[in-house]
Amino acid sequence: MPQATLRTDRIELVPLSDDHLEDEIELDADPEVMRYLTGRARDRAEVEILHRRRLAAAERVDGLGFWAGLVDGRFAGWWILEPPTRADQGPVEGQAELGYRLLRRRWRQGLASEGARELLRHAFEDLRLTRVFAETMAVNTASRATMRAIGMRHVRTFHPDWEEPLPGSHLGEVEYAITREQWFASRAAGA
């Protein structure tokens, strides 16, 4: 199954393509956007390398990958469903990691959760995945709030080895997750 175009009330989620490279460069050039990821802005050369990796994510497992989120036809950020990449994240088959990154001017508008909810729907209804998880630094309260808002539950706090520790990294990373059964149960309950 090729990567689908998805829609919410406000967002069109289109498979990431070379057309979005300049948007990705703008996104990753904002040090506030990157605060809990790298602690600094990325330069063009770094983003170009990452762009290739992001495009390749769609080739690893059918239906998964990166999506550019368009609001009124303009780039707002990206969302991802990607197969696990580390041994501690569990088996690849049946699960995916959820992620999102938005332009700062698009923060606090409910877009992260709106796009993430659509990716959960896609993961469980269309792709029939069994589990979706997300990770962030424990100090990233905004991302943790988004995870809770879409029905994910805290699974664990872990302490990876940081090559270049960021402020707050001593508190670790957190993993939130939701299973297919939990997602369908919350839908039936009207959540």
Image (cartoon, helix red, strand yellow):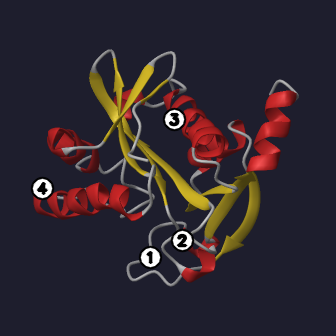
Judge whether residue 127 can be spotted in this image.
yes
The answer to whether the residues at label 1 and label 2 have Cβ atoms under 8 Å apart is yes
Q: Kindly report which numbered mark, 2 or 3, lies closer to the viewer in this rendering.
A: 3
Measured in 3D between alpha carbons, the distance from the residue under mark 1 to the one under mark 3, in whole angstroms, is: 26 Å
Which residue is denoted by mark 1 in the rendering? 165
* Distance Cα–Cα, label 4 vs label 1: 23 Å
Q: In this figure, which residue is indicated by the disc labeled 3?
A: 112
Task: Inspect the image, locate mark 4, and give the three-letter code of the amino acid beneath it.
Answer: Arg
Label whose residue precedes the other's in the sequence (2 or 3): 3
| Left or right, residue 72 beside residue 120 | left
> Residue 160, relative to residue 127: is it above or below?
below
Query: Where does residue 173 sit, x and y in percent of width and height?
Result: 60, 68
Q: What is the C-alpha distance between the residues marked 4 and 2?
A: 26 Å
Q: Position of residue 153 (x, y in %)?
A: 77, 52
First of labels 3, 4 by sequence position = 4
Quarter of the picture holding the C terminus: top right
In the rendered structure, which amino acid carries the disc numbered 1? Pro
Can the viewer see residue 103?
Answer: no
Count the marks. Answer: 4
* Label 1–label 3 contact, CB within 8 A: no
Left or right, residue 183 beside residue 54: right
Q: Quick one: label 4 or label 1, which is nearer the N terminus? A: 4
